[in-house]
Image (cartoon, rainbow, N blue to C red):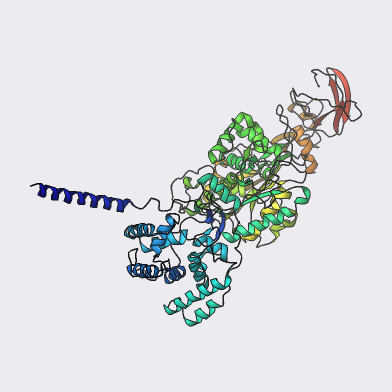
Amino acid sequence: MSGKITGKLWKWKWRIVLVMVVIWFIQALPDPLFDTQYCTVMYSAENRLLGAVISADEQWRFPERTDVPEKFSKALTCFEDKHFYDHCGVYLPSVARAAFQNISSSQRVSGASTITMQVIRMSRNNPPRNIGEKIIEMILALRLEASHSKEEILCYYASHAPFGSNVVGLDAAAWRYFGRTPEELSWAESATLAVLPNAPSLIFPGRNQERLLTKRNRLLDKLHAAGFIDEHDLSLAKVEPLPGQPHALPQDASHLLHTSIMRYGQGKRYASTIKSEIQKQVNQAVERHISSTRWDEIHNAAAIVIEVSTGNVLAYVGNTSDPSNSHGNQVDIVQAPRSTGSILKPFLYAAMLDDGLMLPNTLYPDIPLQYEAFAPKNFSEEYDGAVPASEALSRSLNVPSVVMLRDYSYTRFYHLLQRMGFSQLNQPSDHYGLSIILGGAEASLWDIGRIYASMARTLNDWTNLNGAYDPDRWNTGQWIRTDVQLPEKKSQSPPFFSAGSIWSTYEALLRVNRPDEETGWENFANSRRIAWKTGTSFGNRDAWAVGTTPEYVVAVWVGNHDGIGRPSLTGARSAAPLMFDIFRQLGNTGWFATPYDDMAKVAVCSESGMKPGSACNHVDSMFVPSQGIHTQTCTYHSLLHLSDDGRYQVSREGSEEYGINPRCWFSLPAVQAHYYRKGHPGYKDPPPFAPGCEPHGQIPIGLIYPKSDLRILISRGFDGEYIPAVLEAAHTRPDAKLFWHIDDQFAGQTSGTHKLSVLPESGRHKLT
């Protein structure tokens, strides 16, 4: 009885042991198999290496491959394990042969490691070679074969095999020794890399060339004997030179690579949207441009090229290259918040058109203005009195833009920019105020480029979708490859701006004065049409230029990373030439289709740019965004009653003495007229009123400086004496005389140009 029980217990013990062995066998392999650190690498859209950062353990070890090129696979198996596809991880004839040879000679003469066993050995960090370790390798090799395909095992080998020095893996070896991808290697190059892991500490390119050549050629003979290469290929392969010293890895997009590491993590293989040839051209353009500005102490520049249809970044240059990094060249300016200058003005223009607040050529004041402590000035410090909105945009005039923002509401514009995707607006709207349109806020080149591209994409989608929009495609922008989102008909409402408003904005931006070398571009039938805008921040610290076509957006920043300004640092002089240089590399493109179905043909007063009123006598017609039909009628024309000789305005009471002749007249307020007539010799002020016909309440005088409740600071000159303040006014009649009083005391008389120098006492004063 006891014997039977004992036998049953032994059977159960062996079953338990067998189950435990099976469980151990199943779980024997660690997950992941290789617990190691990898380089961070980035590839272009064409799978060209753009750059790499060495791993934390100072090894050039690229992330694991998912396939192995055919030439290297055949060379490797032919050299290391010709029975690789026939065994299950351990090749017993080789084990028996090696055991016999090693025992006979009392030393290690040959090994029996298959490729699978070598993978296991590498995953265990190459422990000392002994019988016990060899048995473990065999067991784990069987386990690896049971759970992985032959192709996966080859990928493990190709990713982790040592190739000499600190080069690990096929990818790193191909780039370090031959300067190209493993897929592009020749038979000779593949054979060279196949023999290197066999003795990486002894044989690697640059040393022991004769032994390396012998091993390579012997392998080529085996490949020929196996029928993989013919006699002609064999002879050509044998005359190929061996690699010399390792190549430096490409650094064509170093800033983008480091930005990707900070944003998405290290030790990864990034498949980017960058087009390698465009990237190289933009790199060269940036370096070429900055070499011409360094003499003026302008040392940094950044540029991106975005494909409008997809939002893919085709080129990304975060900064100029300088090995010494003496000017902060490692800073990725594309992502850095910088003062925007005037680069946001097109969004305000499009928003006002879209809301029916103006027409493209509506006149806006261009005169000296004061809003409490904020006194906007044009870059030229000159004024035109009144300018059409489209001209104010194309010339980037500051004063009309501030007036437009005042009418639109800076709080409303601030929230619009936030919703559009400007992520650096992190202060309340009152912090920026009206200055937000002139550079009072910060934005990154990345946000600016993406949002300009979103505008162009919205217009293209409207055409492609037959009058509809895809709101999900707004603010699309990426440098990591993803599935391209094709436009789908989703909404009749635009995400932010209608197609008509965007097209009208681009038409205004076509008329921006180009840099000197681009002058006369519109005279060439095949010239590229680019809607573009520049920006210059306060103190000449940042120069911007953004250009848009139906295919591309090019966004450029030029300046100094530390914010030091330079007098010559302006958008037009410093950034625009680089932008146009990049566009020249991209080639000619077409132009946006006119979205007639999203526009209305309206009558327009040719002088005010507004819808004509009853007194407008010069009327044109033009296509405007649909909301333009709701805009205000002309406020600049009025019906005047003139004397028969046209010298006076008359009232009904004076009509018997002077006669009465109705005339339509275009007139501006006094201060606007003062500046307007300088650039418009044909402008005529309304005639004065005849004696006895003066209306009550009309003031023909406009005060230019100072405005009401303005605080004036009196400064001292170099001689220590106070410098007088200069008061300025305008009158509708050029021949008028003005009499100035301060605190009801006569201060002076002016005629023609009405300027008066005064030096009042400290305190509050009344100017009459």
Q: Of 95 and 21, which appears nearest the observer?
A: 95
Q: Of 276 and 498, which appears nearest the observer?
A: 276
Specify the quadrant of the image occupied by residue 615: top right
Q: Is residue 566 above or below residue 102?
A: above
In the displayed structure image, the side of residue 540 where residue 408 appears, left or right: left
Residue that lies at the very extreme toward the bottom in this rendered image:
231
In the displayed structure image, the side of residue 336 where residue 521 appears, left or right: right
Q: Of 161 and 518, which appears nearest the observer?
A: 161
Q: Is residue 86 above or below residue 49?
A: below
**Total of numbered circles in the picture?**
0
Residue 565 location in percent, x, y? Answer: 74, 42
Q: Quadrant of the C terminus?
A: top right
Q: Of 759 and 261, which appears nearest the observer?
A: 261
Residue 177 location in percent, x, y? Answer: 57, 65
Residue 275 in view (yes/no): yes
Residue 607 in view (yes/no): no
Residue 371 location in percent, x, y? Answer: 70, 29
Residue that lies at the very extreme toward the left in this rendered image:
1
Specify the quadrant of the image occupied by residue 243: bottom right
Q: What residue is shown at x 47% (from left), y 48% (from top)? A: 468
Residue 241 location in percent, x, y? Answer: 58, 73
